[in-house]
Every structure is written in C-alpha cells, then in structure tokens.
C-alpha cells in the first residue's frame, strides 16, 4: 500500500534553530508564507490574506517597489560619491605634502605663498 503523504502544516517537524535574530525572523516569514499558501490553495484563506496578496500583485505595488529599488541605488551612489570625494581630498593632501617635502620643507613647517 502507498505511504500516506504527510501534511506540510505539521509543525512538529524539526526546524534547525536560528543562530541570529535575522535568521529567526526569516524562518517566521517563511512559515507564515507557507501557511498563507496552504490556506489560499485549500480555500480557507481569510479576506486579509487574500487582499494582501492581491495588493502584492497590483501594478501600483510593482511601481512602488521599483521606486524603492531606484531610491536604494541613488543612496548607494551618493554614499560612493562621498567616499570618493574624501579619497580625492586625501590624495590632494598627500600631493601637497609631497610637493612641500620636494621643495625642501620639513613635515612640521607650514608652507605659505
């Protein structure tokens, strides 16, 4: 006789304990998503669950997600630019020190025009 397939909702199955709070959060999200999927498939999902996934599929949500991705890219670019500007300033300072040393001034003397 064929072995009966166990239900995926059986919470007694072993899940490896999370090592970090972020991993624990991800496990909870995964479990909630699995439960919502099961409810949607067997027709027992609440109206809140249905509306949640309907909103995720809307074009407005997709546009808002794209905007957030672009804002993230913009923030990353601005951060990189700030770091680059700082590095350029450091290079100018190093060049000025090198030139003053080349002109015969010691490191503790200041160069004035």
Image: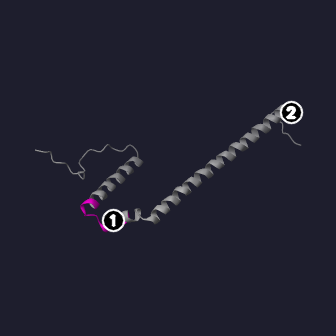
**Which residue lies at the image location 69% right of the left edge and 42% below the top edge?**
87
Please state, as top left, top right, bottom left or bottom right, where the C terminus lies in the image. Answer: top right
Q: Is residue 45 magenta?
A: yes
Q: Position of residue 5 (x, y in %)?
A: 19, 48
**Which residue in the rendered view is the most extreme toward the bottom?**
47
- Quadrant of the image occupied by residue 89: top right
**Which residue lies at the image location 38% right of the left edge and 50% below the top edge?**
26
Q: Which residue is mark 2?
A: 103
**Which residue lies at the image location 24% right of the left edge and 60% below the top edge?**
42
Q: Which mark is residue 50?
A: 1
The magenta span reads 40-52
**Which residue in the rendered view is the most extreme toward the right?**
113
**Which residue lies at the image location 79% right of the left edge and 36% below the top edge?**
97
Q: Which mark is residue 65?
A: none
Label 1 SS: helix
Local packing at callout 1 (Cα closer than 10 Å; few below 14, some 14-19, many 20+) is few
Coloring applied to the structure? one colour
Q: Nearer the viewer, residue 2 or 45?
A: 2
Label 2 SS: loop
Q: Position of residue 100 (x, y in %)?
A: 83, 35
Q: Nearer the viewer, residue 9 or 21?
A: 9
Local packing at callout 2 (Cα closer than 10 Å; few below 14, some 14-19, many 20+) is few
As measured in the structure, the alpha-carbon distance from the residue carrying label 2 to the one carrying label 1 is 75 Å
Q: Are marks 2 and 1 in contact (CB under 8 Å)?
A: no
Q: Position of residue 112 (x, y in %)?
A: 87, 42
Q: Is residue 54 left or right of residue 2?
A: right
Our reading of the magenta stretch's main secondary structure is helix
Q: Position of residue 99 (x, y in %)?
A: 82, 35
Q: Is residue 64 magenta?
A: no
């Amino acid at each position: 006789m064929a072995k009966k397939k166990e239900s995926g909702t059986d919470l007694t199955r072993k899940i490896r304990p999370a090592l970090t709070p972020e991993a624990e959060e991800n496990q909870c999200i995964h479990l909630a998503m699995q439960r919502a999927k099961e409810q949607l498939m067997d027709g027992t999902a609440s109206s809140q669950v249905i509306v949640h996934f309907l909103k995720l599929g809307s074009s407005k949500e997709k546009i808002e997600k794209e905007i957030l991705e672009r804002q993230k890219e913009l923030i990353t670019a601005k951060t990189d630019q700030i770091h680059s500007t700082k590095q350029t300033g450091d290079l100018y300072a190093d060049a000025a020190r090198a030139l003053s040393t080349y002109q015969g001034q010691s490191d503790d003397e200041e160069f004035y025009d």
